[in-house]
């Protein structure tokens, strides 16, 4: 997820911008850049990869007295992570940084190109600076040109723009992407897309509202609202604790990451959906040529998303799949044939067992693809092709948003392959694309739901075990729910296919055995329900998660009526994540750093 910083004042601007970008590192990025205007001259630096590369490039750069500058960390959406696509983007005499997406960029770009403008990058952002410079030609001043430009943009944005035309001013606009301005005791001004870069510099900050735009100079901050009326900044005290600021007011990173899922899934989808198909710019169209089987390989939560993937790939793309636990696969002398696409899945891209299987597949001459959250990780460097999940940095050891984005990627990829294999019609794919657009809404945490789960959690702090049960792709979700619970509550939990209980596990059923039953309306409801009835008849304590009321349940968490089981899947995913979180909180455990676990398992 991209990050923005800006500064106007007399202090060491290079350090302020670079340190600010460092504070945004945790959000994840694949390139970074700064542009500084000092004594009427611009200096601009960009680098792909970690900030250390940008620091190296700016090693000999110094400024003298008053300067203005903007900086950016970029997560590639439109266009690959290259220096040319990194922000700030240059016009003739102005630079811009931007978070979000300009939805009408293609139309604006087409017009600008027709008028003779040359574009250097593949980004949507670059249109902003060219459109601004086009407007500058007929405007009274730079602000009038900026205001006109903002009104021509559609989509979500946080924007900072600097121009030689007014070398003491930073122009800003915010709509749908966060941004704030801060001021220090000398009156210097700071901008950022979240408050952490400003901690230690500013005691007071003002958060912009959607539709706000304006400019800051040495003397003043001028803000207009969406209707063009001036408004005053609403300054408030800034926390001095960086860690708590990073948690954005949530008790734990895991909680923040559960709440963030709607936004990160929006990022996962960005630029990858047209109205009736899935587009993966990062994939060669030949990736699936001569492929008759897909083998997925991963560990832990990533393994669960691979299991979900196998249901979708077989159902939609009609391709044979197999799913392997990496630590098993690497030692069992597996048979690998060249008509198999080998897909590894990893949040970190560093998990030793998964990495080893990727090496084995490469050595056997298979085509390889990694679905990963961390660009430039070992797996990304090794695999033939990569799809980044764009979940942003995940700090909680128990994975949440990484899983959610992996499943979204696999859903998209299965549709992409359905088109390649002609196994779904254009209409069917278009319908699913529409459903994909609804995923961000389906994972939004509603206060009432969270409160209900918080209250219910007190009944699930003991017992001799939990069974999470589900059918079809709700079975891997059951596995994932059980894994979440055991990791952070230290209670024994198992995921089981609902239909498998009577083949053994039902012997454990008694009131102290807690069954968490996933009962989606749109997938095998009656079958799943009768499995739960079998458990209820043996007096197991049942917590049903379903949009349909179930009278045999002791507890009931009602999910929304959805139009597809896929949307039910995502809503139920949030419910099981929150249930684990609240049980762990009540037990007084360290939710973010559970005992015995590490975030990245780089040893066997
Ligand atoms: C569980 C969890 C782990 C990881 C597993 C693989 O919440 O986070 O099970 O999923 O260690 O890690 P990655 O995905 O980084 O390969």
Image: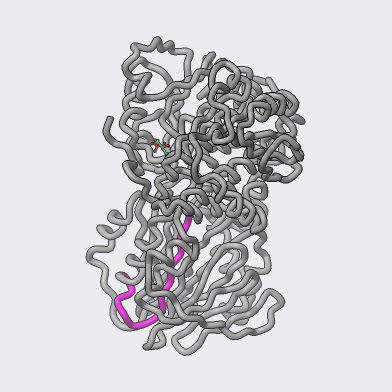
In the rendered view of the protein, which quadrant contains the C terminus? Answer: top left
Residue 119 vs residue 144, the one in the foreground: 144
* Residue 112 visible in the displayed image: yes
Q: Residue drawn 40% across and 49% down?
A: 30
Q: Residue drawn 43% across and 80% down?
A: 189
Residue 60 vs residue 234, the one in the foreground: 234
Residue 62 vs residue 371, the one in the foreground: 371
Task: Name the side, left or right, on which 597 lies relative to 557.
Answer: left
Q: Which residues are magenta?
A: 1-14
How are the colours assigned in the image?
Answer: one colour
Q: How many marks?
A: 0
Residue 249 screen position, x and y as percent: 49, 65
Q: Residue drawn 55% across and 33% down?
A: 513
Residue 107 vs residue 587, the one in the foreground: 587
Residue 394 screen position, x and y as percent: 43, 49
* Residue 2 falls within the magenta-colored stretch: yes
Residue 537 screen position, x and y as percent: 68, 27
Task: Name the side, left or right, on which 59 lies relative to 433.
Answer: left
Find ligand 1 in the image and state its quadrant. Answer: top left
* Residue 207 falls within the magenta-colored stretch: no
* Residue 437 visible in the displayed image: no
Residue 90 screen position, x and y as percent: 47, 62
> In terms of image quadrants, where is residue 34?
bottom left
> In terms of image quadrants, where is residue 56?
bottom left
Q: Up-down: is 255 above or below 398?
A: below
């Amino acid at each position: 997820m991209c990050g923005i910083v800006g500064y106007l004042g007399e202090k060491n601007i290079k350090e302020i911008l670079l340190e600010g970008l460092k504070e945004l590192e945790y959000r994840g990025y694949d390139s970074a850049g700064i542009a500084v205007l000092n004594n009427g001259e611009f200096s601009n630096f960009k680098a792909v990869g970690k900030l250390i590369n940008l620091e190296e490039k700016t090693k000999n750069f110094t400024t003298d007295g008053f300067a203005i500058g903007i900086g950016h960390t970029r997560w590639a959406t439109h266009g690959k992570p290259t220096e040319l696509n990194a922000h700030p983007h240059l016009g003739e005499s102005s630079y811009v940084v931007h978070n979000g997406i300009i939805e009408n960029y293609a139309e604006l770009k087409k017009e600008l190109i027709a008028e003779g403008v040359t574009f250097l990058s593949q980004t949507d952002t670059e249109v902003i600076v060219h459109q601004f410079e086009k407007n500058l030609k007929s405007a009274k001043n730079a602000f009038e040109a900026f205001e006109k430009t903002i009104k021509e943009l559609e989509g979500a944005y946080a924007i900072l723009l600097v121009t030689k035309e007014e070398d003491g001013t930073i122009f800003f606009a915010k709509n749908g992407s966060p941004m704030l301005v801060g001021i220090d005791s000398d009156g210097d001004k700071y901008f950022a897309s979240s408050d952490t870069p400003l901690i230690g510099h500013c005691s007071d900050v003002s958060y912009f509202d959607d539709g706000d735009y304006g400019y800051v100079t040495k003397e003043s901050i001028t803000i207009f609202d969406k209707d063009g009326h001036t408004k005053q900044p609403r300054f408030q005290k800034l926390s001095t604790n960086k860690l708590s600021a990073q948690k954005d007011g949530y008790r734990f990173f895991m909680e923040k990451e559960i709440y963030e899922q709607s936004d990160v899934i929006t990022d996962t989808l960005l630029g990858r959906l047209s109205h009736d198909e899935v587009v993966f710019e990062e994939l060669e169209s030949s990736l699936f040529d001569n492929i008759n089987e897909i083998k997925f390989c991963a560990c832990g939560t990533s393994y669960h998303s691979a299991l979900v993937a196998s249901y979708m790939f077989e159902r939609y793309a009609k391709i044979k799949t197999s799913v392997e636990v990496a630590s098993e696969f690497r030692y069992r002398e597996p048979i690998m044939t060249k008509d198999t696409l080998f897909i590894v899945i990893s949040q970190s891209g560093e998990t030793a067992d998964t990495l080893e299987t990727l090496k084995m597949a490469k050595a056997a001459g298979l085509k390889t693809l990694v679905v990963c959250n961390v660009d430039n990780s070992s797996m990304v460097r090794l695999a033939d092709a990569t799809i980044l999940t764009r979940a942003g940095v995940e700090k909680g050891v128990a994975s949440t948003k990484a899983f959610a984005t992996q499943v979204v990627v696999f859903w998209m990829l299965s549709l992409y392959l359905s088109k390649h294999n002609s196994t779904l019609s254009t209409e069917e794919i278009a319908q699913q694309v529409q459903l994909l657009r609804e995923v961000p809404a389906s994972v939004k945490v509603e206060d009432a739901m969270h409160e209900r789960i918080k209250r219910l959690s007190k009944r699930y702090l003991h017992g001799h075990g939990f069974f999470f049960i589900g059918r079809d792709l709700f079975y891997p979700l059951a596995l994932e729910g059980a894994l979440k619970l055991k990791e952070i509550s230290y209670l024994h939990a198992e995921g089981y296919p609902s239909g498998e209980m009577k083949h053994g596990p039902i012997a454990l059923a008694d009131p102290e055995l807690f069954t968490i039953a996933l009962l989606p309306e749109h997938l095998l409801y009656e079958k799943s329900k009768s499995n739960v009835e079998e458990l209820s008849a043996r007096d197991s304590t049942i917590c049903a998660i379903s949009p349909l009321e179930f009278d045999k349940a002791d507890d009931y968490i009602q999910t929304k009526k959805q139009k597809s089981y896929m949307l039910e899947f995502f809503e139920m995913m949030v419910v099981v994540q929150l249930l684990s979180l609240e049980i762990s909180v009540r037990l007084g455990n360290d939710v973010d750093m559970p005992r015995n676990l590490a975030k990245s398992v780089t040893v066997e």
